[in-house]
Image (tube, rainbow, N blue to C red):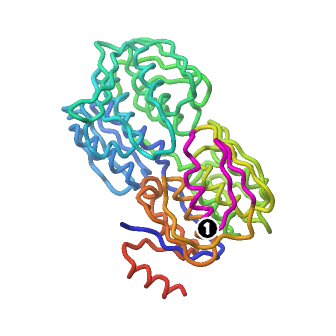
Amino acid sequence: MEHYIIKGGKPLEGEVEISGAKNAALGLLAAAIMTDEEVTIENLPDVSDINQLIEAIENIGATVDRVDRHTVKINGKTIDSYVVEYEQMKKIRASYYLLGALLGRFKNAEVALPGGCAIGSRPIDQHTKGFRALGADVDDENKNGRGMLIAKADKLIGNHIFLDMASVGATINLMLAASLAEGKTTIENVAKEPHVVDVANLLNSMGANIRGAGTDKIRIYGVEKLHGTTYSVIPDQIEAGTFMCAAAATGGSILVKNVIPIHLECITSKLIEMGCIVTEYDDAVRVKAGDNIRSTQLKTLPYPGFPTDMQPQMTAVLSVATGYSIVVESIFENRFKYVGELNRMGAKIQVEGSTAFINGVNGLKGARVSAPDLRAGAALVIAGLMAEGFTTVDDIVYIQRGYENFEDKLRGLGADIEKVSDDREEQKFKLRVG
């Protein structure tokens, strides 16, 4: 199994280009199968989640042309199956977007139950509630020993839907299905994340009539059919935030390019509280670490609040902050599984329920740690970059789900990091960097 070997202690300096947003791209790819014309998606991140979804789309019969690593052309005219049983779909959460897309277009869908990182309970009851409100019969049953979500309808009819919680996945899935429903659909208490807006913008460019994405209420006026288009994925807010935290953690200065600064304000404000200097440009931000990292308090919230996907990275930085920090996780109940790994590196963090109490230490020491999920893996890499000595991060398959060329981008900033597959390669790296 591949793992990262890191020698810490070097400030990261330079520029880094941010890839397209994984969470947006997954919804965009699902939307692309909702027409019998060609849809071109540009600025795709080359990560395993994206590649698995593209392969699954191809497996149901869509014509897929991978123009290059970051561009794909999809034509759903040739789709000949509404059943997504692809084994890899169980590894990614966004498999459920194909349910909304297939149900919207064909009124028939069977999709493997979603997988992804085990960061807590993520029920899909809001998705099924919304599909039923649109007139679909929905069942989750064990078909041939594999968990499947099944949704069918003679026709979909617009309705008023109030979500019990502001679920990103349910908001996107219901937008997909309702775009081709008869009449008007109103969805209230929706998620407002940038990738929700991005999916709405793509659907509108395909001929849908969606209004209010990014606000508390989305109104969808169903259309008869959608058409082809070309669309570029927004920059990845979470990848950008990860490199911003890496600058703060290592005492460095990084220009983070190809971003939308307004999407980063919740992260920027915390880093400024912690003593960093943040300069915003039209499509970039520079983060320069202060003389020392100050403690702070944060609570994860739906957008525009502080994102749960940035909580582990920020906690890693706060592990060496001066003073006492408190981090409250309000979205997922199992998001602190990485804390034990940080404590093995010398951090002093105590978790009680949904709250982490952090007593900042003077520094971390390298150790062998294991990534329990995607964002926690990125946090452990950040910890390794600021730790004394060598750190080995195992189970990096999680990290590769959401970060394109992570180690290459970090090396471009001066980091000593290598992806290796055995002890011999690890020893070569240690001899080379000293």
Q: Is residue 400 magenta?
A: no
From the viewer's perspective, is residue 103 above or below residue 366?
A: above
Residue displayed at 65% across by 48% down: 264
Q: Mark 1 highlights which residue?
A: 345
Q: Residue 113: tell me if it is visible.
A: yes
From the viewer's perspective, is residue 63 above or below residue 155?
A: below
| Location of residue 391 (image quadrant) | bottom right
The N terminus - image quarter: bottom left
| Location of residue 154 (image quadrant) | top left
Q: Residue 303: tell me if it is visible.
A: no
- Please tell me which residue lies in front, 396 or 304: 396
From the viewer's perspective, is residue 16 above or below residue 146?
A: below
Residue displayed at 49% across by 54% down: 372
Q: Amino acid at mark 1?
A: Met
* Residue 324 shown left or right of residue 10 in the figure: right
- Please tell me which residue lies in front, 56 or 213: 56
Disc 1 crowd, CA 10 A, few/some/many (<14, 14-19, 20+): many
- Please tell me which residue lies in front, 287 or 315: 315
| Location of residue 13 (image quadrant) | bottom right
* Residue 161 shown left or right of residue 397 in the figure: right
Q: Which residues are magenta?
A: 332-359
Image position, residue 350 (x, y; %) = 68, 53
Image position, residue 150 (x, y; %) = 30, 25
Image position, residue 362 (x, y; %) = 74, 70
From the viewer's perspective, is residue 174 above or below residue 382?
A: above
